Structure formats: structure tokens, C-alpha cells
Image (spheres, rainbow, N blue to C red):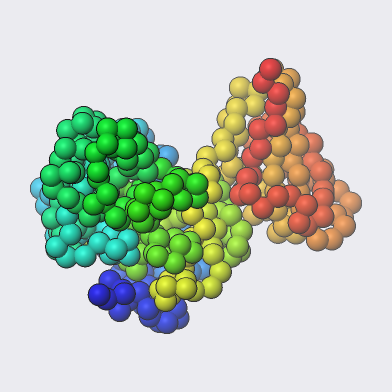
Amino acid sequence: MNDYFDTLETRAPEVREKALLAALPAHVSHAQTHAPYFTQVLGNVDAKGVGSRDALADLPVTRKSDLSAYQVRRPPLGGMNATPLGGLAHVYQSPGPIYEPDGRGSDWWRFARAMFAAGLRAGDLVYNTYSYHFTPAGMMIETGAARLGCCVFPAGVGQTEMQLAAIRHLQPVAYAGTPSFLKILIEKSEAAGADIGCIRRATLSGEALPPSLRDWFKTRGVTARQLYGTADLGLIAFESDAQAGLIVDENVLVELVEPGGTRPVPDGEIGEVVVTNFNPDYPLIRFATGDLSAVEAGISPCGRTNMRLKGWLGRADQTVKVRGMFVHPGQIGEIGKRYPELVRLRLRVEGRIGDDRMRLICETNVAPPEGLAARVQETLRDVTRLRGEVDFVAAGTLPNDGKLVEDARAYD
């Protein structure tokens, strides 16, 4: 049995980085030429110059949270698709609503790599409980399994008695779906005295997998591995048998940026997962997922050499409403750009609803010069249209939790 899906997974990190950056200029040019949204937002960008991470970080971020509005203004896909609908295989709809394309070709969402790392091999029968209608999750597993040479039973969720009967009859070796539904199936089988111990491997997504639930599966003989993907981007990262973070897919470039902002954060700090894919049909560039994570240092013990993420660490959307006005994390990031002497910022909203008070806490390595507090306070008012106080603290005082806006109000 091969340990790796392909040789890309064990490349020297510098070789991988060089290849990804070398592919960026042509990808940006392709998006500018064929996707009307990127024609507009990248109109002044020289694609030939986007060959480094610094150059990439200068490009605007497209936020998943804004997709629905973009698609209303420019249906059906917000102008982000470079391939017209007639050249695609499917269009799906996720909650929002957000519409997502599916292109023609093998393993379009690239899930086979993650499924291989979860132990699936040619000839295995995969019990797929993801939906095949409206959302693309079922097809993501379907196409990944086909790439591996697996057979799939399209189960969906619900009708647990029928599901247990199908599992006992078909004897699938692998499960694909959410952790919670696998737990339901196992609990129902135990209560009914129905043996579904044929399931030995599980590739899980859509929900968090806490260590306690992973251990619970292990006591039932199921090896559970996580994959991290979205309907827009396909596979982003996946877990191997090393269980040492989520290994980034070989066909995406991942940045971690200030939550709600655009600037990359130092390795080890929590940031928002921003992804550039290299999909010619749907060329998303600096696509902000809204998920928080951090870089896991070093190389995975399994031998795969790509960047690793520490897993899902929360959501980046920290927007709050203060005195009838929305305050966004990106606004706090904008203030930080104007004052490079400030290491880290956090806006803390205190008091009670109807009696809101804002305090901008600023980390600095040096004693703040006279007048800096007044200037930052004025900038806070200009950017947010709200008044607030400014406090300076020593660098390292604020928790490293990825928050730019903290709602500390009392709601009782």
C-alpha cells in the first residue's frame, strides 16, 4: 500500500513554494481575462508582477460572507466564474443562498487526496451520507471516490433503520459524512443489536471533531480522519494518520490574515484562512473563508511536507453593532495600517446595550509619544464614525485568539 497519494506531497517545501508562486501570474491573468468580477477588482494589477507572497498580499480579499450579495448584483455566480454555465457540469446552492459551480473533469474538488490520507483505497465501498441535492457535498465525495477507484453507496441522512440494514447487507469499509451522524448510526446499531463493525475508516467534515468523540469512535474500531473543504474552493486541508494538524492541499495557496482584514499574520498567530485556488473554471483569488486557524510549525510526522493548520479555531466574523452602527474587524485592521508602531489592536465594546462604550486597546513595544493617543482616537472616530477611548499596553498583553473586536457588553 502506498503511503502517499502522489509525489507532490513529499516535495521539499521550497520546491512547492516556488511552483505555487510561479503559477500565480498566469492564474491572475486568466481570472482578469475571463472572470468579470476579477476583471473589475484586479483591473489595475499587473499580473506578471504577482509572483511572490508579498505581491499576493497586496491584492484585495474577496470574502465568502459577501458572495450572496455579489451574486444578486451579477447573477448567477457574481461574475467569478471564468467558464460559462454551459461549460460546467452542475450548479449547486448552499445556505445564504450562495451558488457554486461544478466543472467537468475528474475529482474537480480534489477530495481524493484527503480520502486517500484517511485510508480509502481502490475497491473500497464508501458509505456516503452527504447530500447530493442543492449542496455539492455528496458529489465532492463521489468524485473523489471515483478518482481512487472506490464504489459509493449514496445514502444521505435519515431513515436510520433502512441505513443500518443497508450497511449490514453491503458491508462498507468506509463512512463519509458528519461526525454526529456517524455517532447516531453507531448508537442506533448498538441499541438494536445490529453489527455495523464493517465500517473501519471514516472521513469526516462539516462539524468539529473533538478529541472525546474521536476516542469514542476509536473504541468502536473506527479510525476517524478530518478533511477541511468548502463548496467554493474544494479541498483546503486534510488530516493524516499522524493526527498532527491539517495538511494543506497541494493545489491551493493558503494565507492566514488578520481576521476581517487583509494583512498576513506571523506564523503561529491565529488568523483568517484565505485561499487562492488554481481552478481555471472558478479562479478564486485571496478568498476569505471566515474560518480562523493558525500555522502548525514544522513538517508532519507522516512525511507530508506542506503547511499544516491547527484546525478550526473559530469564526472571523466579529462584526458588532454599537449605538446603531456596525463596526467591522476590517475597520480595526485599517487603523492598524495607519500606525505601524502599534503591534496589535483590539476594540473592546463594554457597558450595556443602549449604553455602549468603545475602548481601543493598542499593543506597543515602546512608550507612546505625546499626542499619539489623540491621533489614534481621531482615526477611530473617522473610520467607525463613533467615539471611543484609546489605551496603550505592552506588546504581548492581548490574548493571541485572533480577535480584533470583542463584545464585552452585559446582556442581562
Tell me the quadrant of the picture where the C terminus can be found. top right
Residue 354 position within the rendered picture, expressed as x and y whole percent measured from the top left: 69, 17
Residue 323 left/right relative to 14:
right
Tell me the quadrant of the picture where the N terminus can be found. bottom left
Quarter assignment of residue 28 = bottom left
In the image, what residue occupies the spot 34% across and 53% down? 222
Total tally of numbered discs in the picture: 0
In the image, what residue occupies the spot 58% across and 65% down? 267
Foreground pick, 243 / 331: 243
In the image, what residue occupies the spot 32% across and 32% down? 191
Relative to 377, say whether 252 is above or below.
below
In the image, what residue occupies the spot 29% across and 63% down? 119
Relative to 2, say whether 359 is above or below.
above
Residue 230 left/right relative to 132:
right
> Can residue 218 be seen here?
yes
Residue 202 position within the rendered picture, expressed as x and y whole percent measured from the top left: 31, 52
Residue 277 position within the rendered picture, expressed as x and y whole percent measured from the top left: 34, 60
Relative to 180, say whether 25 is above or below.
below
Relative to 284, say whether 22 is above or below.
below
Foreground pick, 14 / 217: 217
Residue at the extreme front? 193
Quarter assignment of residue 394 = bottom right
Residue 274 position within the rendered picture, expressed as x and y whole percent measured from the top left: 45, 55
Residue at the extreme left? 86
Residue 255 left/right relative to 127:
right
Residue 90 left/right relative to 52:
left
Quarter assignment of residue 386 = top right
> Can residue 206 be seen here?
no
Foreground pick, 230 / 141: 141
